Amino acid sequence: MAHDKSLTRRFMLLSGGATLASTALPRSTAAATLLAGKSRQVLPTYTVLDYPGNPYLRPQGGPLSHPWQTSRTPKKGPALIRRHKPATTRSAAPHLAAPLAAAPLATVAAPAVPSALVLYDTTNQFGWLGELYAIMSVNLASHFADWTAMPVVQYETGEINQYTCVIYIGSTYGEPIPTAFLDDVLTGTRPVIWAYDNIWQLTARAANFTALYGWNWAQFDFSTVAQVNYKGQQLKRYAPNGAGIMTYSVVGSNVTVLATAVRSNGTTFPWALRSRNLTYIGENPLVYISEGDRYLAFCDFLFDALAPTTPTQHRALVRLEDIDPTYNPTQLQAVTDYLTSQNVPFGFQIIPRYLDPNGFYTGGVAQNIPIASVPTFASAVQYMLDAGGVMINHGWTHQYSNVKNPFTAVTGDDFEFYRVTQNSDLTLNYQGPLPGDSTAWATGRFQSAQADLQAAGFSLPALVTFPGYAATATDYAVAAGIFNARAERSLYFSGQLTDGAKIDYTRLVGQYFPYVVYDVYGGTTLPDNLGGIEPLAFEIFPKRLPADILADAQRNLVVRDGFASFFYHPSDSLSYLQETVTGLKNMGYTFVAPDTL
């Protein structure tokens, strides 16, 4: 009988989001005067497990005593359609030789594609946050466009005309924005998406701004807001987020209010608006993100700026989670039979070797079970493949050595590619690279996974999910050279947009995507936006039922070419999967196989 040990993955998805990033940062005295108001702290209207050490809830890292290092050379990246690898035979990935030679990406004839310029803040002791928000922005933009990212202070006259659109996230109050950028926004025609701070610098630059654009800002509203309405859907917003949302002194008839914020007393005010070439979002949409969050509106705004003719379609992905050699073959076959009976393509994760080095679950008797040693399990895996299931590599052992990382040192419980410790209150600390982390070390883990799979008659899959959704920049780069895509949420680190900079593992954030992207690691990343089904709460981890998955899938309909991607543990009741699949179909979602994206 398989143990239900998948603690870390359930925690990531069910604890309320991928990137609850804090904006509750110190502001200057001038800012306090301008933004006068009182933050009201109330309980959120939906379950969010929020604690300071979780990078999937908020960026990690404290203030700097020196200016954030920036690059003189803008960082560039390709659009997904330029760099996307062609589909391969299911469950087949490039053969891993020792030492590994990174598989080159296929060269394909690329049509003309849009381009995005992402500008970000870098000054002040929290200037490093700007780069993290820029990383999140370019990740999203990569779905549509080639991208360039650079600090806003380096902007020069006329650069806006080189791109299809510009995205600026105002994360530092009082960032010294060049007048060249302000003037180009005011006189240009390229779409500009501007979020949160420093909009007053733009409005002050044009004496007739209100006449030109039909609106002007007033002050930040610090009311409790737990909902943003967009396209007829009620999107979530983390209620204790006290950073404020901009309000307006005037909103004219020539202004399109794209989305509205809903206060706790039911009154509303614009959350995002558009006129002429400017789309303004009254807060940072890249902070405090959960499933079904108002972040989805920002994801959809990018279609308007970069791919306005995109037809609406809604696709779904289902993934069977954390399958290791101790799994009950009968359960796997039953889930497979149900999905095939419903004509639902599916992915399934495989952990090639089960380890319990300290005998945590067996009274001190160590366990070491490779897939080839359990023929009935291997037969069940072949059964899933024969039914059209798409195998996804899930590391080698889904744990690290014989030390707790951080729970039990047992397969399915622990992280494999990142060091994590646990506090006495059960919260987690994301420490950084594991001892020995390197290109050779990460490659060796995947080579070992391949060897165990080959011993059982299988190939290394073309897709991968890092255990616990955590790895280093080195590990992600290794995966990009081996696998066609990652099916997951991921961590992103300071220094990734600065050429020659050392990656700073003390400053990081996580992100999920409602559509396929080609992220800053140079790898295709599939949507992973709804989380997984968890029938029971465990320790600090809340339960998440099909009704929760479906409610957030309803919210995801605002993304015009978005996905509903969820996972399910085959050890749970089949009824949970049935309810979720039926509900998604009834909403109009069409299930697709993960290896077709």
Image (cartoon, grey):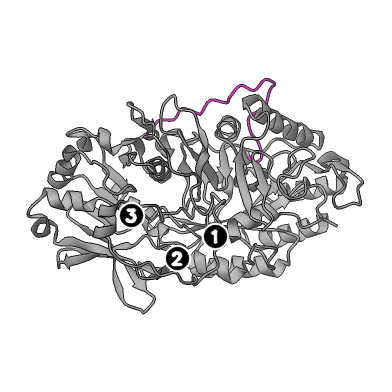
103 in the magenta segment = yes
| Disc 3 element | helix
Q: Of the residues shown, which amino acid type is indicated by label 2? A: Pro
Q: Which residue is mark 1?
A: 50
Identify the residue shown where x is 40% and y is 45%: 133
Identify the residue shown where x is 62% and y is 26%: 439
449 in the magenta segment = no
> Which residue occupies the foreground of this view, 142 or 502?
502
**What x and y, as percent, mark residue 24?**
41, 56
Q: Of the residues shown, which amino acid type is indicated by label 1? A: Asp
Q: Which residue is mark 2?
A: 240
Identify the residue shown where x is 33% and y is 58%: 283
Front position among marks 3 and 2: 2
> Which residue occupies the foreground of this view, 318 or 125?
125
Residue 440, placed above or below residue 186:
above
**What x and y, as percent, mark residue 209?**
11, 55
Which quarter shows the N terminus?
A: bottom right
What numbered label is drawn on residue 301?
3
**What x and y, as percent, mark residue 68?**
38, 35
Compute the Cα span from label 1 to label 3.
27 Å
Q: Is residue 206 left or right of residue 597?
A: left
Compute the Cα span from label 2 to label 1.
10 Å
Q: Is residue 493 left or right of residue 101?
A: left
Q: Residue furthest front?
A: 29
Choose the circle earlier in sequence order: 3 or 2: 2
Front position among marks 1 and 3: 1
Q: Which segment is the magenta one?
A: 90-110
Residue 377 showing in the rendered view: yes
Q: Is residue 70 left or right of residue 202?
A: right
